[in-house]
Structure formats: C-alpha cells, structure tokens
Amino acid sequence: MHLDAIVIGAGFAGLYQLHALRDRLGLRVCVLEAGGDLGGTWYWNRYPGARCDSESHAYRYFFSKELYEEWQSSERYPGPAEIRAYLDHVARKLDLRRDIRFSTRVTAARYDEGTNQWRVETEAGERLSATWLVTAVGCLSSTNVPDIPGLADFKGRWFHTGRWPHEGVDFRGQRVGQIGTGSTGIQAAPVVAETAAHLTVFQRTANYSVPAGNHPLTAEFRQWVKSNFEEIRAVTRSTVNGHAFRISERKALEASPEERRAVYEKAWETGGLQFRGTFYDLLTSRAANDTAAEFIKARIRAIVKDPATAQDLADIDHPYAAKRPPIDSYYFETFNRPNVSLVNLRKDPIERITPNGIKTRTREHPLDIIVFATGFDALTGPLLAMDIRGRGGCSLREDWKAGPHTYLGVQIAGYPNLFTITGPGSPSVLTNMPAAIEQHVEWITDCIAHLRKNHIRTIEPAEPAVQAWGEHVQECARATLLFDAKHSWYFGANVAGKPQVFMPYAGGLARYARHCAEVAARGYEGFVLDRGRAAEAVAPTAQAGV
Ligand code: NA7
C-alpha cells in the first residue's frame, strides 16, 4: 500500500498531524498506532491517581476555535479518561478514525533511495510505503523497568505505571511496594494507600512537590474559558513552557524575605506548576532557587509528622524544578497514615527482589504487589524501539549511540523526509505538550506543502546545521539549573547504559517557535532541499538571535 504520508502514533501529535496533512494538504495519510485505541500516553497511563499536570484549559488543541469552545472540562487537571474522551470527540468531529490502524506496532522503517520512499514494517509483518514519514510516538512512551535481580522469581504481581491494566488493580488487603517518587509515584501513592493494607514507598531520590490544587471547575470558570480562547491561546504561545499562565518578571532576590514568603505561600495555596513561575530567575540562579527550595522543604517537614520520615523526604539533592517538578494531591500527608512507610534507598539500597518481596540491605519487605513508577526511556527510547534506517542503510540506533543529533529536534541528517514531532533537541517535555505538538505539526505541514509546491524530492538537515543546533541545545541547558541535576531523565541518566546528553531544548517554546519560523522564511535554512538534480543546501547562518 503506497501513501503520501505515514504517521506513527495516535496521541495528540498523530491525530493533529493526520488532520493537517489529510484535510489541509489533501494527502493520502495513514496513522499506525500500537495501542488498541487513540490517546497515546493516556491510553497506557491509567495508574491510580493519574492526572495531567497541565491545566485542562491549556491541555487542548488551539488550532480550531470551534473545537476549543465546544469542549467542557470537568476538573482543573484532566484525568486519562477525560483526555481520551476529548481526543475521541476530536477524532469524531474531524472523522479521523477511518485513517488510523490500531493495534499496529511499527517495528522498522527504511528509506529507499531509489524510489525515494519510506518502507514501513509492522509487528504483524505488514508493509506500507510513503513519501513522508512522521513520528508522533511521544516522548515518554518506552517504559523503564529497572533490571533488579530476582524480579522473575517474584511470586506476587507487578505492574509498571505506564502499562497499567485497563481493568485496574485491586489493592484491598494487599501489601504494596512502590518503587519511584517522580511525578507518577507522587500521584499514585496517595491513591494506592487509600485501599492497600500497607504501602511501602521505595525512594531513591527525594523530590520536591507542590500541591496541585485540583478541584471541579465552576460554571463561571468554564464560561470564562469559553469566552477567552484568543487570550488563552496567546499566553500559551508566548510563554517559555506553553502553559496558560505567565511567568513573573521579578527576580527572587529583589524581593524581601517577607515578600518572597508571601509569594510562595500564595503559590502553594493556588497550587500547580505556577509555583515555578513565581520568580523568573528560579531556574537560572542557584541563590534564587534556594529560596524556593527551602520554602518547599520547610513545608514537607511541617506536613510529615514522623521526623525521620520528614527528614528523608526533605533531603533533596538538586535545585527545585531542575528535575521535572511534580505536583500532588496529598502526597506528603500520605506518610502520616499508619499503613504507609518510606524506605530511603540512599541509606538502605535494594539488593534484590525475592519471591516474597523486596530485600534491601537491612531487611526483607514482604509484598504482594510491586508497582514500578520508574519512568521512561525518554525522548530517544520510542524512536530507537523501531529499526529506523536512512540513506545507505545507516541505522538510527548506531548513529545515536553517543546521543541524539537532530536539527531543531524535527529532522535527522541522513534520514530524508522523516520528521520527528517533539523529537530530542526540541522543547518537548519542558512544555505543556499540546502547545509544542501544535507548533511542530504546523511547521511540518507547512514544510511538506512547500516541498510539494516547489517539486522538491527530499529535505534533510545539513551536517553543520545539526552540529550547530546540538551545541545551541547544550548551551541553552547550561544557562539553566537543569544542567545541575545530572541524574535526571532529561540527561537519560535513569536508563542503564544510555548516553548522558541533555536532550530537550531549554531555550523556551516561544523563542524556539520564532526560530523555526525564521528558518522556514529563509527558505529552510540549514536543510538540504533536493529537486532531483543537484542538491541545494541553504547554508545556516550563525545561531545569533536564536
Ligand atoms: P520519573 O520522573 O523518571 O521518576 C521515576 C522514579 O523512579 C524516580 O523517583 C527514580 O529515582 C525512580 N527509579 C528509577 N529507577 C529506579 C531504581 N532502579 N531503583 C529505585 N528507584 C528508581 O518518571 P515518572 O513516571 O514519575 O514521570 C515521568 C514524566 O511523566 C513526568 O515527569 C511527567 O512529565 C509525566 P531517581 O530520581 O532516578 O533516583
């Protein structure tokens, strides 16, 4: 079957990409999706307490005012079922399902130079081909189950939060061990603790968290959202992270200690990722960051009644928000329950999993269920799970052995006509994802329209542009405190054997989007456009002004 474009993945990115290529450009498009239905992240992540950290009026598409205005969210933060219902609504409205094949996992994609086609293979052995291949595989979809010895002998049941059984898990009367205290573990623990006989949380790195402040939305707020589409969209498109709130223009140390405390207290009450926006230098100045960090640590110590547990929870070794900052619903309060205990793995590391539970250095913890809230092989994992081969059979797994190399996070040298939505080197995981996705989908769609109009056979980045972009990505990260948390998954540090390279673009979504628009306006500067005769490279200018 030959198509104009194949899109891999039917989450936020894949659905919009299908609509844009099919309905705006008139292309023949097919979406291949591994899951049994649409939703991407939200198809797989159905663990207890799962909820988006972006607010529901920002975690949506903005490409259609009508679509935006007709959707009503029920809570401040949407849960997986509501997000899937929203995407289902979008799919029905735009008649997307007819071009999506579910339960179809792509295993390989090979560029055929002779025919200028991508040949795609699925797990079931199906073969499809297309001129353009767009990956919409998500950044956090390859689950990371750590290789702890003994797991195969465990007599109880175990689950990774990112592959949660659709029928749910009954924790009643069960002794549950949860490994991991990232955003997921911090959401899951309070809900698991409500029904489990006992919950033991195994914490390797203590983590900051601020209250999410989730609540049902009032009719007034929903009306406000409906009446302010343009304004809300304008904010998501002009801020660093693509959220619907602005970052303060004030520096933390310019405020007096009393003023700072008042600002943090208000943000704590409001809840949410807004805490990160209380002062604009929280992620660039360690002294500024310390003021926020100390405030949160003091809150943890005040909430958690057992002093030793409070100390272990507040013993945080990195700047606030240098790792992905979680938001929670009564996470720290959960440790005041009689059926919850904390194991500090820094003091008492896991030695192995036994048939009956988890053995740390000092004792065995008997368990019926182990929950792995251990995160993902982020950004590169979902791409490298497929055997992607470009010119001359070059392999992405080989080419990225020392870390990903992209231009703008959207294309890879040697892999013509392949586009990676929210790929490594783009703002992606540092943003409210739908905002980053919309920008990429629109840029890719405009690019493909340009190629067709100008009879250009292939587009791929020139090596010098890739090199310069890679340096710029590192430079942007180095300008922030994100670069100080070397054990974060932004560096790939959570996956054994993964190269340690800072992967997302930390220069901000608005700035990135401007730069991408300028690249396109300058005739796709830094890309090689092949008209079928001599390739025409559009030389990159210096990165100044990026
Ligand atoms: P994260 O943020 O990667 O968190 C994973 C957690 O699991 C974190 O606390 C890890 O500790 C811990 N972990 C990982 N491997 C181990 C081993 N081997 N032993 C003990 N503990 C371990 O994943 P999440 O799913 O919470 O969040 C991912 C993103 O999804 C989130 O940021 C949002 O964007 C949505 P560590 O900190 O590495 O010491």
Image (spheres, helix red, strand yellow):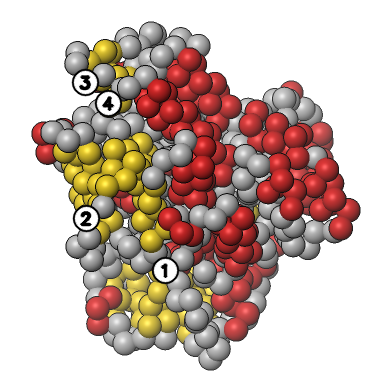
- In this picture, residue 401 sits left or right of residue 376: left
Q: Is residue 49 above or below residue 58?
A: below
Residue 497 showing in the rendered view: no
Which residue is found at the position 83% from the left and 43% from the top? 227
Q: Are marks 3 and 4 in contact (CB under 8 Å)?
A: yes
Residue hosting label 2: 127
User: Along the polypeptide, which appears first: circle 2 or circle 1?
Assistant: 1
> Looking at the picture, which amino acid does disc 1 mark?
Gly
Q: Measure the C-alpha gap from mark 2 to mark 1.
A: 19 Å
Residue hosting label 1: 36
Q: Secondary structure at mark 2?
A: strand
User: Along the polypeptide, which appears first: circle 2 or circle 3?
Assistant: 2
Q: Secondary structure at mark 1?
A: loop
Q: Residues within 10 Å of mark 4 (few under 14, many from 20)?
A: some
Q: Measure the C-alpha gap from mark 1 to mark 4.
A: 34 Å
Q: Measure the C-alpha gap from mark 4 to mark 2.
A: 22 Å
Q: Which mark is residue 532?
A: 3
Residue 427: x and y, percent? 48, 35
Q: Measure the C-alpha gap from mark 2 to mark 3.
A: 26 Å
Which residue is found at the position 71% from the left and 42% from the top? 65
Q: How many marks?
A: 4
> Looking at the picture, which amino acid does disc 3 mark?
Gly
Q: Residues within 10 Å of mark 2 (few under 14, many from 20)?
A: some
Which residue is found at the position 82% from the left and 36% from the top? 258
Q: Are marks 2 and 3 in contact (CB under 8 Å)?
A: no
